[in-house]
Amino acid sequence: MSIQLSRRVQRVKPSPTMAATARAARLKAEGRDIISLTAGEPDFATPVEAAEAGIAAIRDGATRYTDVGGTAELKQAICDKFAADNHLHYSRAQILVSCGAKQTLFNLCMAVLDPDDEVIIPAPYWVSYPDMVRLADATPVIVDTTIESGYKLTPQQLAAAITPATRLLLINSPCNPTGAAYSRLEWQQLGEVLAAHPRVLIGTDDIYEKIWWADEPFSTLAEVCPALYERTITINGVSKSHAMTGWRIGYCGGPAEIITAMATIQGQSTSNPSSVSQRAALAALRGDQRCVADMNAEYRRRHDFFIPALAALPGFECRRAEGSFYAFVRITGALQRLGLPDDQAFCDRLLEAEGLALVPGSGFGAPGHVRLSFATSRAQLEAALERLGRFLRSA
């Protein structure tokens, strides 16, 4: 029997980061000595306050449905977070809590996009952006950036990419996979372009906000360009900031009309996020934030060790990041040295020869690159560098 799948699902592909992580896990389960730098996941424990709040929620019987868009208490904590950290002022009606920032982004695409719409996505991009757009029957418009431009979208590129069909810009700062982040001046310059195009909505993905060490404080577009507040959806969550990936709590603030539409999509898909996870997220946002600063300090130490070491390897080019816990490496020189055709072949051969798992840059819209996560121990990073060096010297 031949089963016909929808054209919609045939337009998308599995997440390459998930695929690389799963492959490494399978090899490790088979007894191979594998170091995996694939997963974008903090290696710290969830803060004790948040974990205890989750346990207490179960014991107290807080295990039933909540409002589709989140509890009033958690929404208020998110309003307070936006006001304190980002100088953005939202009412609870302008907040949506979802099952991770990934669902938030999916809800946004489903709520605002039609088949003739275009969505501008700077590359390198987080792997799910283009496929979410395709699932909403819209068209991703990829704008390439390079290591020479700091992997950032320029105002000139943005202006050239906007057409009458442009409906949405999706932009991530700090960026997965590059770690690049926009300064206040860069936001202002992009904002000037967007101000001339009132139909264009903006989704700013700030999930790595708290993993930050640039020279100036973190800023987000709606904060820097208040004239764009009414058409910007600011997206965040506790997964990266509080090491709560498995709890699946993301959130956003934005225009009430769009938030209501996104909640309608959510109400017909998952309904509310986990009641237990919401209690944990409330404790995370309301609690002592020193644990967040401590995690960030450790990520920065790893960054300051790992990036120069990678850049010193033959055939590797790597820039310093402003945030996140990724190194993004241009490997065109290494491909030449090794006689390999592309980044996928590089990752396959490296995994086979040295038991080191990385993610090919082609999955992020950047062929000829690889992404390495440094959300792991210094010992693992040192071992990975040793394996990489041996592999590159094998040419």
Image: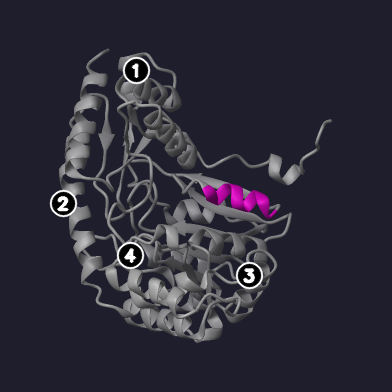
Residue at numbered disc 4: 242
Residue at 50%, 79% in the rendered image: 61
Residue at numbered disc 1: 336
Residue at numbered disc 3: 271
Which of marks 2 and 3 precedes in the sequence? 3
Q: Position of residue 104 (x, y in %)?
A: 54, 64
Which of marks 2 and 4 precedes in the sequence? 4
Per the model, the C-alpha gap separating discs 4 and 3 is 24 Å
Magenta stretch, main secondary structure class: helix
Element carrying mark 3: loop
Element carrying mark 4: loop
Give the amino acid at mark 2.
Arg
Per the model, the C-alpha gap separating discs 4 and 1 is 41 Å
Give the number of the mark in front: 1 or 3: 3
Give the amino acid at mark 3.
Ser
314 within the magenta span: no
Q: Where is residue 346 in the image (x, y as percent from the top left)?
A: 38, 23
Residue at numbered disc 2: 301
Q: Taking 356 as reference, is 380 above or below it? A: below
* Figure quadrant of the C terminus: top left
Q: Taking 165 as reference, is 35 above or below it? A: above
Give the number of the mark in front: 3 or 2: 3
Give the number of the mark in front: 4 or 1: 4
Give the number of the mark in front: 4 or 2: 4
